[in-house]
Amino acid sequence: MSDLLLKTENNIATIAMNAAPVNALGQPLRAAIYAAVQDALHNDAIAMIVLTSTAKLFCAGADITEFNTERAFASPSLPELCDLIDHARKPVVALINGDALGGGLELALAADYRVLAEHARVGLPEVTLGLIPGAGGTQRLPRFVGAEKALTMIAGGKAISANDAKISGLVDVVLSSSAFECEAEKVCRDFLSKGVPALDCADILVDENAIAADFFQQFLARQLPAQRGGFAARQGVEAVARALSQPLDEGLASEAALFRECETNPQSRALQHLFFSQRAASRIEGVDKNTPVKSLNAVAVIGTGTMGSGIAMCFLSAGLPVILLDSHEEGLARGRATIEQNYQKMLQRGRITEQQCVHCLSLLQTASEYSALADVDLVVEAVFEDMAVKTAVFSALDAACKPGCILASNTSTLDLDAIAACTSRPQDVIGMHFFSPAHVMKLLEIVRGEATSAECLNTVHKLSKRLGKVGVVVGVCYGFVGNRMVAPYSREAFRVLLEGASPAQSDAALTEFGMAMGAVSMADMAGIDVGCMAAEANKHEWQDDSTYQALQFALRERGWLGQKTGRGVYRYEGRLKQASPDVQAIIAAIAHEHAIAPRDLAQAEIADRCILMLINEGAHILQEGIASRPGDIDLIYVHGYGFPAWRGGPMHYADEIGLPTVVSRLQSLCTSLGAYGERWFKPAPLLLRLAEQGASFAQWRQ
Ligand code: COA
């Protein structure tokens, strides 16, 4: 099928992009549009050019698969195409019938007039890929909407609604979506009859007086403090500043130079890796993409704690009716109250409208008997993490739910196959491991049991997208991918305390690396008792190391369970965290008992030890087939554990520093840390093999 559909009617040449699925502006589509615009310009019978799309979307922008290849700037490049449109001597109208993102919006900005469908969103998301707009977006957008709005859109990367686009002056007309085609045709004819002129963007000046003299410095200080990520956002600020100080042609040249710097920055490789990993994660190993999907019209959630309530909210917010089940009335009341409070908070913060809040709550029912679940299509169990409790729930669900109903467990560590075995339908049993707070965190580990059917997997994966989650399929083992990897990572973060680092140093090493939070603070937040329980459940892995989480066990004995009890490793006064001399004394006693001499630990060593453990465990996980791709592990760490996206996840980070370096650092710790190092720092066989072959994780299985 042709990339374009062309139509000429009433002196108007319509050029409709027709390159499924998203009109990505690869070289062939760019060339086709370029030629069509030139034809229209040379044809005396044509008085106006209309650029639109036959797809649901207007255009998703530059073709990401061309990035870092010669094709990305092969002629006609996107900037050349935008220049042609901007300088056209005949008026060009962009009929934006659906979302216009990145280069898609840049094309529209080069046009003289923009007409937008009311459901469509427009935005410049390049920063999420570690880039800035490279086809004039940073120079043309401020000319229409002013520097402040342009900066928010470019540095933030979020798309805006049609209403916002109209108010800010980005588009000229917004039309109802249902009658868009026919109404848009009328608008164009109207433009033509009024003789609207072709405009040149270079003639528009950005109003310098609309912003304070120190606006850009203030923006950098406020929005982009000296964090180590955010390279592209800072380049975006610089580019928009040039739109004020330079004429359009010079500004475009500046934008091109700033774009190139982003392109070669490791942060853009990392962010693009995550983009492609997320798309790859929807291809489930051994599951044909045409596998049928079960229809899900009603859902039940068992358990009314923080987790159960959060999970229920995920479904409610996606428009799915939920029955919340608990055998105790007070549990149900507590669950409902938590959900109501959370929606109220979202309303107060402007995240949802009053109408959405009312609608979500209207979809919630409660029940205390399993018989109420006879008609639901999916149940998610979120009860106490104990095998006996879980199997009792699954037996009851097996008896109560209709055939074909998917039975999902939110277990974070338990053996899903053992849970499935207590039902008569193991093919319909699956893990849906949400992360707390479930209605906020983006990650969903989808646990595939031995017997889980392809249909069940495909359905839950599609559901994850509907819930706005990043769904990653993982296999069954202790802790699956995320929690299994967090165990050795947290072990090191705590072990360094015994070797002489303070809790604050341990945390700072990791936050400095870019983690959202240090592992010690994370343990206090999750609950010291929870950490101890997880460690106990996995005791066979570490019983030969008596220092293993010894501090956490000592704190539990004293009832210092973290934030919830006002003290754990740290002392808490409200949200304020303080070092605790008592804990320091306990640490010294444990170190003394195990003859660990205190020393000065460099921040780099602390971070290295923790992150190397993630990489090494990740390599074991890949080799065992618990994760299908290194990118799956990266998605899990970025979306569930606060790993910095700009580093691309632990496996991508390993590739960036080079696997031989990873191996040699592990081996050197193996030696320098004595028996402890020997016990824990042996490089995984897969890591050794890839390093020897000079290969990377990205090349694994290719
Ligand atoms: N270039 C190349 N391919 C693209 C693309 C782009 N700009 N945008 C999306 N695609 C591909 C996806 O990789 C996917 O391919 P696959 O089916 O082979 O995996 C396909 O188009 C559909 O995309 P998907 O994300 O699954 O569909 P969606 O309907 O959920 O979302 C978008 C559509 C456009 C919102 C989303 O894909 C997106 O955000 N794309 C990136 C937009 C962007 O950042 N543009 C600026 C580029 S600098």
Image: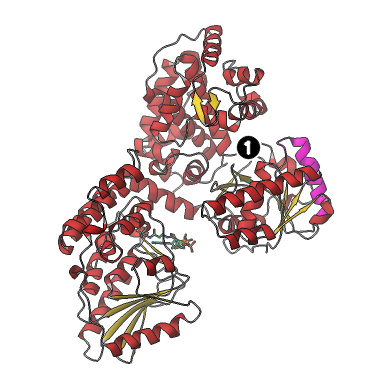
Residue on which disc 1 sits: 477
Please tell me whether residue 587 is drawn above or below residue 90 in the rendered image: above
Locate residue 553: give its quadrant.
top right
> Residue 394 magenta-drawn?
yes
Query: Which of 105/431 is in front?
Result: 105
Mark 1 closeness class: few <14, some 14–19, many ≥20 residues within 10 Å: some
Q: Which quadrant of the rendered structure holds the N terminus? A: bottom left
Locate residue 485: give its quadrant.
top right
Q: Is residue 25 visible?
A: no
Identify the residue at image location x=36%, y=60%. Answer: 124
- Amino acid on which the number 1 mark rests in the picture: Cys
What range is drawn magenta here? 384-403
The kind of secondary structure element at disc 1 is loop
> Residue 272 magenta-drawn?
no
- Residue 376 x %, y %: 75, 59
- Residue 138 x %, y %: 27, 59
- Residue 699 x %, y %: 41, 45
Dominant SS in magenta: helix
Query: Which of 131/650 is in front?
Result: 131
User: Position of 432 compared to 613: left or right?
Assistant: right
Please tell me whether residue 586 is drawn above or below residue 226 in the rendered image: above
